[in-house]
Image: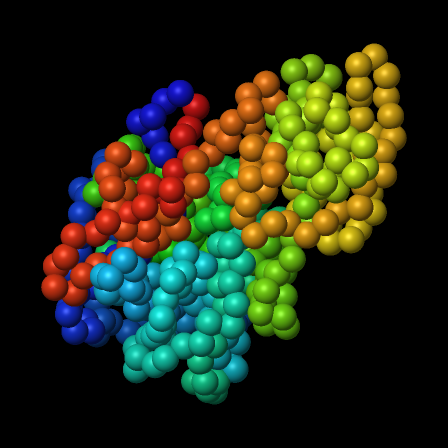
Amino acid sequence: MNSSKAIVTLAAAAVLGAAGGAAVVGVAGDGGGSTKTVLEPAAAQPQPVSVAQRNGDALTPKQVYSLARDSVVFITSDVTEQGQSGQATGSGFVISKDGYIVTNAHVVNGASKVTVKIGDGQTQDAEIVGKDESTDIALLKVSGSDDLKPLQFADSDKISVGDPMYAIGNPFGLDRTLTTGVVSALQRQITAPNGFSIDGVIQTDAPINPGNSGGPLLDAHGEVVGVNSQILNGGGSSSEGNVGIGFAAPSNTVKNVVEQLRQNGSVEHAYLGVQMGDAASGGGAQVGAVTPDGPAAAGGVQQGDVITSFDGKTVTDAASLSSMVNAKQVGDKVELEVRRGDGEQTLSVTLAAQPASASSAQQQSQVDPQQQVDPNQQVDPQQQVDPQQQVDPNQQVDPQQQVDPNGGQQQIDPRDLLEQLMP
């Protein structure tokens, strides 16, 4: 296991003192990447972009920034933990004229108060409508206004590796910073704040850093294809910053989650209740453990089974099965084709609601019930990560990026450390 690499959620940049006086903590050098961060001067006023331009040829970076800059939100969360009070900042973006804003759940976790600054507007209080730990998405609400400029969601299924990408956010408290890059890979998996997997994730080399959490990843038409959530760095320390590997939750997932949050304030995810890994041969997902009293156990799934078909669709590996489960609804009845020993069986399973966290499911099965793992290992290979801080995993630090306004030291509960070791 290579411990020199870690996937971490984007820590919110610490803000000390009055608004506008941001203290940058652990700023790294440029890392030698081919992309470059561009800070748009506040006084600069790029030429407006027409709808015809937006729907036609690809826009220039300057045009994308002009289109989106007034829709990007600077989010500040007031947090108190273990007797220490402080503020953490992140990013977001407006999605409707009636005041709905999308960000990451880890940006507002534990917040007693959330304020937002939309574009060049005034700082105002925001309500947390709801959040979904399983996708790391939160929905905020402010008073609606005709002056709001909502961003549009693109179809994330239509992007390809090599497509130009643009990230706008507030890294290290530097508001509305534009960075550029491309789609580096598709169909990645990352770990959500509650320990479950987020599927279909977009990988990009557009530099994103602490404070970019919740900001938009935009395509060449200025439409949102993803929500920036995590980065891979060299060793788990926020001081190392971006190394050209960032991850964004895909817009098609975000759209579905946002609609449920708007209607219900919460989201239900379908749950199979197995620990699984890729089958050693012949394709499929091998069951490493079954959660007692879970839907798979009730349907007759056993440890060692290889699931080859899910609701009529071929299962090629554990990732494909996870995606198929996530696409279903709680209460859906599905048929599983499984290889067991030298034979095959058809089982019927009714999907249940996903537990609040992978750790709560582990209390029953002593394993992470739905993450991809080596089926021969009875362990969870993806550690739970602090959803709001990049830290050295050996440090004892505070579980959310909370900064004492008087300069107090941070102390993080290592149980909340969100770090996924890469092979």
385 or 123, nearer to the observer: 385
Name the residue rendered at 48%, 85% in the picture. Answer: 144
* Quarter of the image where the N terminus is located: top left
Q: Quadrant of residue 200?
A: top right
* Quarter of the image where the C terminus is located: top left
Residue 296, percent across and down?
75, 37
Can you name the residue that lies furthest to the top here?
342
Left or right relative to 112: residue 36:
left
Can you name the residue that lies furthest to the left here?
406
290 or 194, nearer to the observer: 290
Residue 169, percent across and down?
34, 60
Residue 188, percent across and down?
53, 38
352 or 246, nearer to the observer: 352
Left or right relative to 162: residue 261:
right
Q: Is residue 331 above or below residue 32?
A: below
Name the residue rendered at 64%, 49% in the picture. Answer: 354
65 or 145, nearer to the observer: 145
Residue 249, percent across and down?
51, 51
Left or right relative to 326: residue 231:
left
